[in-house]
Amino acid sequence: MGDALSPRSAALALALAAVAALAGCAAAPQGQAQRLAASMTRAIVSDNPATVAQDLIGVGKISRAEVGLLSDKFNALGQYQGLKLLAYDAAKNEFAFQANFTKGDARVVVRLDNKGRLSAYRVF
């Protein structure tokens, strides 16, 4: 005969499973946002307006000159080293990251639409 869980143990196991499931759901949009923000940041560092425009489809247009200005700003900070999550606003589906470079950092804020696509990218 197998060991039966006590009602208290079963409730605890169920609660832990629910917490793990919720944590997984919360991490999914952050991972998507970080991948998209990192891809956009790399495209800007490389001064690649075609990739920037493709990643922002349906959001609005960004000019070659604007990409160039951001590229100059990022490249003045040195080599790109990645992003670190600073904050998440669930109501706006907005993520704030610190973009790390060898000579400094910049704050990058991205927003995802309801399909998980990049709908805004701002640099502060």
Image (cartoon, rainbow, N blue to C red):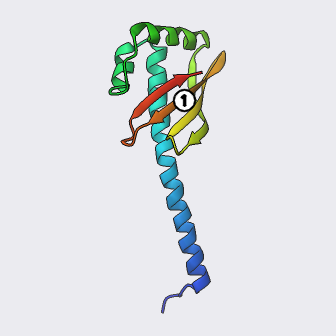
Q: Nearer the viewer, residue 99 or 95?
A: 95
Instruction: Identify the residue at image location x=47%, y=21%.
Output: 42
Instruction: Identify the residue at image location x=38%, y=14%.
Output: 49
Q: Is residue 99 above or below residue 49?
A: below
Disc 1: CA contacts within 10 A as few (<14), some (14-19) or many (>=20): many
Residue 19: % across, % down: 56, 62
Label 1: element kind: strand
Q: Nearer the viewer, residue 67 or 45?
A: 67
Residue 104: % across, % down: 66, 18
Residue 19 located left or right of residue 44: right
Q: Nearer the viewer, residue 88 or 45?
A: 88
Q: How many marks?
A: 1
Image quarter for residue 13? bottom right
**Extreme bottom residue here?**
1
Q: Amino acid at mark 1?
A: Val
**Extreme right residue here?**
104
Quadrant, the C terminus: top right
Residue 69: % across, % down: 50, 8
Instruction: Identify the residue at image location x=52%, y=67%.
Output: 17
Residue 117: % across, % down: 38, 36
| Label 1 sits on residue | 109
